[in-house]
């Protein structure tokens, strides 16, 4: 217990120093947290429980998406999904293809290609949400389009994850795989309906005069949604995001105030723990393919953001949207884990980790640099 407390204390103090540094230089702390995790793992390997890491990661991601959901109403979400259907199709074609093609070039199996395609397709909702919050862009004109792409991707995972984990990887037969997909899709649809049609009722059930009761109520519902997500193989982040959407009125500001500090703490720890799980020895061999995949797929995400926002913002906003979507993270690691568990391709795991680290480090940097773009007034052209 003493060792565990010392390790946790050292991690939190390191986070405080990195957050101070990031605030001083005006940069998102996420890449710094990831590098810190790598350094800690290489210098002083820790003995933290893998189960504890998994639980903390799930809660952190759920809180990040819940806070993002608070920024929008059910009407905003419905309009965003209607407007973003074509962008979702373009996003899948552009970003699934690089991973799929690279696997075929490496002479991997078709199943491995489908898995690596999923790794390159899905953006990290948690990193994107944190970066947008850090850079104070949640209210930007391009943010609803970014949100539409992220929600579409997360909903797509409700079909993709059961498919690869049950039907493809061999966790069950075609019937059981189909039932898992149907159950996941039905649950997502139900939560979406409740969030958009009965948000006032949900707010009334959760609301309370005590901040303590409000904190425990919101956190309890989030944990239940996360548990249902694990059982039905869909993203807990989807349920958390829709819960944030469902809340309305004065409750939104109160929920933001009581959940915000907890979100910040767990999110910072999540990114450090992610870095601490990386095996440094396996990374150099796959650095080249990972770098090539990162370069291509960051361009395709830029094109996705450009396409999704082409009717609502000018060129600088389109670039900001595209760069914001470039980081990959938690879902990509989950998919790589399925590949390792099923014994599909031994190289897919380290390649995916190197790829995620590259995009998670370069994506926030590109997003910040994109914020320097400005539209020149006509008098200066």
Image (cartoon, grey):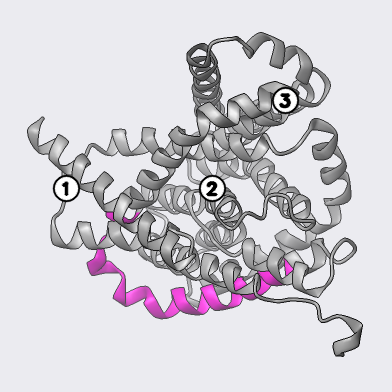
Residue at the limit of the structure toward the bottom, as seen here: 381
- Rendered position, 163 above or below 134: above
Nearest the viewer among 111 and 298 is 298
- Rendered position, 78 above or below 32: above
**Local SS, label 2:** helix
Classify residue 42 by image quadrant.
bottom left
Q: Quadrant of the C terminus?
A: bottom right
N-terminal of the pair, mark 3 or mark 1, is 1
Q: Residue 31, can we see it? A: no
Where residue 29 appears, as percent x and y from the top left, is 43, 58
**Local SS, label 3:** helix
Q: Is residue 318 magenta?
A: no
Quickly name the residue at label 1.
46
Classify residue 159 by image quadrant.
top right
Q: Quadrant of the N terminus?
A: top left
Nearest the viewer among 24 and 318 is 24
Nearest the viewer among 312 and 78 is 312
Which of the numbered marks, if any, corresponds to residue 333?
none
The residues bearing labels 3 and 1 have C-alpha atoms spaced at a distance of 40 Å
The residues bearing labels 3 and 2 have C-alpha atoms spaced at a distance of 19 Å
Quickly name the residue at label 3.
246
Q: Which residues lie in the magenta part?
A: 275-304
- Rendered position, 134 above or below 199: below
Where residue 103 appears, as percent x and y from the top left, is 52, 70
N-terminal of the pair, mark 3 or mark 2, is 2
Quickly name the residue at label 2.
126
């Amino acid at each position: 217990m003493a060792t565990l407390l010392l390790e946790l204390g050292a991690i939190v103090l390191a986070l405080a120093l990195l957050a101070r540094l990031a605030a001083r230089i005006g940069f998102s702390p996420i890449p710094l947290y990831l590098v810190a995790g790598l350094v800690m793992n290489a210098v002083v390997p820790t003995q933290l429980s893998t189960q504890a890491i998994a639980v903390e990661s799930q809660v952190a991601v759920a809180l990040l998406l819940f806070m993002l959901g608070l920024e929008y109403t059910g009407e905003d979400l419905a309009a965003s999904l209607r407007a973003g259907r074509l962008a979702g199709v373009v996003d899948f074609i552009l970003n699934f293809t690089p991973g799929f093609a690279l696997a075929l070039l490496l002479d991997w199996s078709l199943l491995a290609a489908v898995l690596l395609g999923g790794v390159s397709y899905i953006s990290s909702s948690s990193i994107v949400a944190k970066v947008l919050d850090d850079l104070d862009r949640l209210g930007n004109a391009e943010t609803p389009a970014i949100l539409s792409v992220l929600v579409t991707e997360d909903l797509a995972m409700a079909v993709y994850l059961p498919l690869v984990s049950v039907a493809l990887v061999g966790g069950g037969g075609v019937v059981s795989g189909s039932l898992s997909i149907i159950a996941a899709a039905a649950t997502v649809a139900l939560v979406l309906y409740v969030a958009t049609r009965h948000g006032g009722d949900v707010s009334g059930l959760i609301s309370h005069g005590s901040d303590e009761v409000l904190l425990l109520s919101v956190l309890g519902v989030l944990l239940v949604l996360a548990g249902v997500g694990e059982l039905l193989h869909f993203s807990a982040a989807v349920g958390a995001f829709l819960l944030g959407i469902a809340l309305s009125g004065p409750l939104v500001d109160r929920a933001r105030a009581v959940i915000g500090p907890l979100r910040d703490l767990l999110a910072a720890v999540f990114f450090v723990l992610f870095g601490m799980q990386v095996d440094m020895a396996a990374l150099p061999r796959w650095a080249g393919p990972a770098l090539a995949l990162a370069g291509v797929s960051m361009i395709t995400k830029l094109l996705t953001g450009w396409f999704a926002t082409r009717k609502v913002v000018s060129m600088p906003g389109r670039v900001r949207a595209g760069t914001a979507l470039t980081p990959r993270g938690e879902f990509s690691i989950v998919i790589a884990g399925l590949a390792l568990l099923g014994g599909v391709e031994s190289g897919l795991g380290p390649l995916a980790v190197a790829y995620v680290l590259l995009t998670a480090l370069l994506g926030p940097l590109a997003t910040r640099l994109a914020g320097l773009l400005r539209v020149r007034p006509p008098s200066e052209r």
